[in-house]
Amino acid sequence: MSETEDELFNALGFSWNRQGVPLSQGIRSVENAVARYRQMMTTFVWDAGVLENNPLTYVEVKTLLDGVTIGGQRVSDQEQILNLAESSKKLFSMVRDGSFALNKTTFTTLHGIVARNEALEWGHFRGEGEEKMTTPNVGLGEHGEYTPLATDHGAKGLNRVFERGVQALHDQIPSPFERGAAFFLFGALQQFFFDGNKRTSRHMMNGVLMSAGVDAISIPAAKVQEFNTKMVGFYRHKEATEMMGFLAGCRQDHGFKSLPENGAPKP
């Protein structure tokens, strides 16, 4: 490991085999990447909901996004889907007008929509609001729990970690795919918010990709178990080579083919 890589990994809190990360492919214009994201938005929202154990089906998500409420489903489940859709629209709007940036302002803005009325607090880091004591744990099943940096007054520790990590990403990772994927894992590991960390960090990953003219990535609903298993390994060992490979594989899974009028794309 080079001294530069060592600095990068220390800043982020995890490592990976950088030689094994695929180079960005399919670079297009930013407008084209955003248009393809919009085309696939229902699928992206449904996939993200499945990762959160949201019970709405693909057809119900499509109906909800068309402006029709769903009978027999909890209001909180519908609101989670609507938050995902609204935050997705905010994301592609920011990418399209050039205001997206890999920074705290963008991160907290998107979180304020993603986790609205769901997280303990939303739109700021843990410790920057009224709650100063609670530190969230990530359940790892039979492997117990992962506990991130403790919540402190003003989120001084989290802000230091964020600034150092983002600076390292900007300085040392030129590839949009590797930088975006690394940010997703960085956000998931450090748990800057009380909830909604993975959802918001995936938005940031996709903002990095689309801003470079690269198609966004979704975790297909059919791969939920594989995703969860690999994430448990990531939290336990702070080693991201498998997750990098998994995310690279997800780029091909959705392929942005034409979608059927009714129902979800085939797994």
Image (tube, helix red, strand yellow):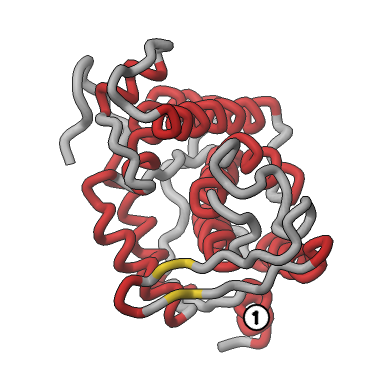
Query: Local crowd at mark 1 within 10 Å, few (<14), some, or many (≥20)?
Result: some
* Residue depicted at 70% across the width and 58% down the height: 126
Q: Amino acid at mark 1?
A: Asn
Q: Quadrant of the C terminus?
A: top left
Q: Is residue 124 left or right of residue 260?
A: right
Q: Which residue is mark 1?
A: 10
Is residue 152 shown above or below 48? below
- Could you say which quadrant of the image residue 72 lies in? top left
Instruction: Kindly indicate the quadrant of the structure image that contains residue 14.
Output: bottom right
Q: Residue at x 53, y 61 (%)?
A: 188
Q: Is residue 78 above or below residue 121?
A: above
- Residue in view at x 25 percent, y 22 percent: 59
**Do we see residue 115 in this rendering?**
yes
Secondary structure under the numbered disc 1 in the rendered image = helix
Give the image location of residue 172, x and y in percent: 67, 68
Judging depth in this view, the residue of 84 and 133 nearest the camera is 133
Residue 38 occupies quadrant: top left
Asked whether, in this view, residue 16 is left or right of residue 167, the answer is left
Location of residue 3 in the rendering, given as x and y in whole percent from the top left corner: 67, 87
* Rendered location of residue 223, percent (x, y): 25, 52
| Residue at horizontal 72 percent and vertical 55 percent from the top | 125
In the figure, is residue 146 to the left or right of 155?
left
- Looking at the image, the residue that sits furthest to the left is 266
Tell me, yes or no, if residue 17 can be seen here: no
Q: Image quadrant for the N terminus?
A: bottom right
Give the vertical position of 218 relative to 89 (above or below): below
- Residue placed most toward the observer, 28 or 119: 119
Asked if residue 8 is positioned above or below residue 176 in the image, the reply reads: below
Q: Toward the viewer: 15 or 63?
A: 63
